[in-house]
Image (spheres, grey):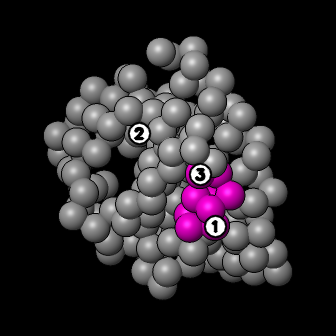
Amino acid sequence: MHLTLLVGTMTGTAQLVAQELELAWDDGELQVETLLMDKLDGTVFEREGAFLIVTSTYGQGDVPDNAKALYEDLKAKRPDLSRVRYGVFGLGDRTYAETFNFGGKRFDDILGELGAQRIGERVQHDASSGVLPEEMAEQWGAGWLALAKEAIAVST
């Protein structure tokens, strides 16, 4: 099985989370690849396997700068993503209550609109919680990975 982690980040925290997940998950049977969203477009979803969006939120609830091109491409071209299975691990800070975790929410919303099927619930890490995002990801990850393997087995 193949799993692609797509990373939207401004400060590198989301990339750290993705790297920790890749180290924990890439075991030979599961092939994990982490890609920064820089210069990606909707064709990235033509890859085999499942996807995990790992993204922070920036500014007024926006996707990070490096994720804007992919997000805008999906909105403009509106490809059929009905064969895509994905998850979302969003990073945010609840002190910004009105836009908390909107980077992850925006990707979740557009992927859902385009027919992709989310695996599990959208995760919303809160930077003000005192729990490091990579620790939360590690705890959450095993359960999500089992769901992802099941979803890919059913869709093939």
Image spot of residue 6 (x, y percent)? 43, 56
What is the spatial separation of the Cα atoms under label 1 and label 2, in whole angstroms? 24 Å
| Inter-mark Cα distance, 3 to 1 | 10 Å
Residue 38 is situated, as x and y percent measured from the top left of the image, at 28, 67
Foreground disc of the pair 3, 1: 3
Q: Which residue is mark 1?
A: 20
Name the residue beneath numbered marker 2. 111
Residue at image position (57%, 44%) is: 28
SS assignment for the magenta stretch, majority: helix
Magenta stretch, residue numbers? 18-26
Nearer the camera: disc 1 or disc 2: 1
Q: Which mark is residue 26?
A: 3
Camera-side residue: 45 or 116? 45
Pick whichever, 58 or 7, lies toward us: 7
Q: Is residue 21 magenta?
A: yes
Looking at the image, can residue 103 be seen?
no
Report which quarter residue 111 is drawn in. top left
Amino acid carrying label 2: it is Leu
SS of the residue under disc 3: loop
Residue at screen point 32% across, 74% down = 65
